[in-house]
Image: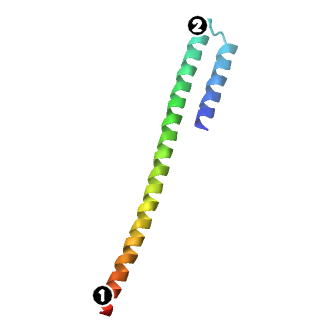
């Protein structure tokens, strides 16, 4: 969404400049700046995608650890109760 808003704003700005007395050099500079912003946005999107994947992997690892801990706790509880019966 942020990328869309930024792109829309830049495109609107370029139209305003084109409507005014923008020179060819101004238009080319604006296009270059837009390309830079797009590259930055794409890099940020890729980093966010990698971070999401890492977070999902960490969530899965945490769930597995929780299950192992629950099983270990249950086993310890059974051993403790068996010791009380003796």
| Side of 47 relative to 26 (left or right) | left
- The single residue placed furthest to the bottom in the displayed view is 86
**Vertical comparison of 23 with 35: above or below:** above
Viewer-side label of 1, 2: 1
**Vertical comparison of 66 with 7: above or below:** below
Q: Quadrant of residue 72?
A: bottom left
In percent of width and height, residue 50 lies at: 48, 40
In the foreground, 27 or 74: 74
Answer yes or no: do the residues labelled 1 and 2 have beta carbons within 8 Å? no
Q: CA distance from mark 1 to mark 2?
A: 86 Å
In percent of width and height, residue 7 lies at: 62, 28
> Which dot marks residue 12?
none
* Quadrant assignment for the C terminus: bottom left
In the foreground, 54 or 18: 54
- Which residue position holds label 1? 83
Report the coloring of the rendering.
Answer: rainbow
**Vertical comparison of 12 with 24: above or below:** below
**Vertical comparison of 56 with 9: above or below:** below
**Residue drawn at (48%, 37%) of the image:** 47
Q: Element under label 1? A: helix
**Residue drawn at (56%, 20%) of the image:** 35
**Residue drawn at (46%, 46%) of the image:** 54
- Which callout, 1 or 2, points at the residue further toward the start of the chain? 2
**Residue drawn at (41%, 71%) of the image:** 71
* Quadrant assignment for the N terminus: top right
Q: Residues within 10 Å of mark 1 (few under 14, many from 20)?
A: few
Q: Residues within 10 Å of mark 2 (few under 14, many from 20)?
A: few
In percent of width and height, residue 80 lies at: 32, 83
Q: Element under label 2? A: helix
| Side of 42 relative to 74 (left or right) | right
- Which residue position holds label 2? 25
In the foreground, 53 or 44: 53
């Amino acid at each position: 969404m942020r990328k869309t808003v930024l792109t829309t704003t830049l495109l609107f700005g370029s139209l305003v400049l084109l409507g005014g007395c923008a020179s060819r050099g101004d238009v080319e500079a604006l296009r270059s700046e837009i390309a830079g912003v797009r590259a930055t946005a794409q890099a940020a999107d890729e980093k966010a995608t990698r971070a999401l994947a890492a977070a999902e992997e960490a969530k899965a690892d945490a769930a597995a650890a929780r299950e192992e801990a629950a099983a270990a706790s249950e086993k310890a509880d059974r051993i403790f109760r068996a010791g009380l019966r003796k």
